[in-house]
Amino acid sequence: MSTRREHPTHTTGVHRAHRGTHRAAARPPAPVDPYRDHLDGLFTYCLSVMCEHEAAISVLGEALAVAERQRRRGRTPADTALHRPWLYALARWSCLRLLAERQGVRPEPPELPGPLATARRRELAALAWPEAAGTGPEQREALELAVRHHLPVHEVAAVLGTDHDGTELLLSSAACEVERTRTALAVVDRGGCPAVARLAGDREVLLGSALRRELVRHVDECPECRRTAERVLAGGPWPGTAPADVGALTVLP
């Protein structure tokens, strides 16, 4: 009789354990974040435009909120291949909107603890691209998308709202300026010309557009530097044909 009392209890325990296993197996998977794979690139893009962390976080948050509203309404691009440039275009729109609101107004930088302020300055410095110092704003933006973020021409065109041929021409002209600057910097590194050494000064200082202009002009006009530049260029790609040949540019987490 005692055996009969224990048997149902044992069976019920096994049954409950089985039901618990069944419930765990039937639990729906966690939802997939549709933006996760693009967050680092989008944040880096926003920071490169805004040059300030709080503003970059704000515009990125706004862009993602718009993207989510559009997604819930079924208004995302039908072609999944256009999903990435669509997100970058939203980030660009959000950046330009805030910049327009701030026009003529310089916000006060937030008070940050020393280590955090240092880390943020380091991150901004990591986005520096000396070889692009000679490009105009439109060229630089197209190059950033193509080189740092690895967007092909048609995606860059989709982000900027330009046609394919115009975007290709913009990237080609920007690549030529990058090649000229890179060549001038290589001449500086090779040394040998006192004038270019005086112009370059401390190579740790970020290369500005004015200094870049002087360096490039000197390399074009100085016979010794021009010969050095020809040796640097020997065997390399034709200027303007390889804008991505600059190594990996930093993408911040």
Image (tube, rainbow, N blue to C red):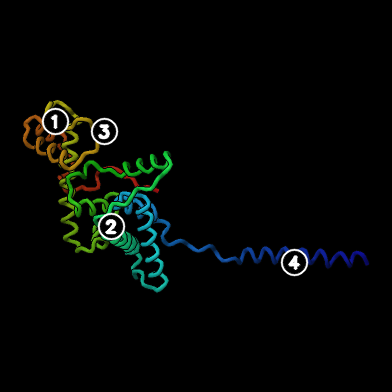
Mark 2 to mark 1 CA distance (whole Å)? 40 Å
Judging by the rendered image, the residue that carries numbered circle 3 is 204
Q: Amino acid at mark 3?
A: Glu
In the image, is 88 to the left or to the right of 9? left
Q: Secondary structure at mark 1?
A: helix
Q: Earlier in the sequence, mark 1 or mark 3?
A: 1
In the image, is 120 to the left or to the right of 133? right
Q: Nearer the viewer, mark 2 or mark 1?
A: 2
Q: Amino acid at mark 2?
A: Arg
Judging by the rendered image, the residue that carries numbered circle 1 is 196
Residue at 11% across / 32% down in the picture?
225
| Image height of 80 relative to 187, above or below | below
Instruction: Tell me residue 139's x, y (percent).
Output: 19, 52
Does any portion of residue 155 appear in the rendered image? Answer: no
Query: Tags 1 and 3 in contact by the CB under 8 Å rule?
Result: no
Asked where in the image residue 98 lies, by quadrant, the reply is bottom left
| Image height of 66 relative to 212, above or below | below
Q: Secondary structure at mark 2?
A: loop
Q: Amino acid at mark 4?
A: His
Residue at 26% across / 60% down in the picture?
100
Asked where in the image residue 220 lies, by quadrant, the reply is top left
Q: Earlier in the sequence, mark 4 or mark 1?
A: 4
Mark 4 to mark 2 CA distance (whole Å)? 65 Å
Q: 142 or 96, which lies in front? A: 96
Q: Earlier in the sequence, mark 2 or mark 1?
A: 2
Judging by the rendered image, the residue that carries numbered circle 2 is 102
Instruction: Tell me residue 44's x, y (percent).
Output: 34, 51
Q: Secondary structure at mark 4?
A: helix
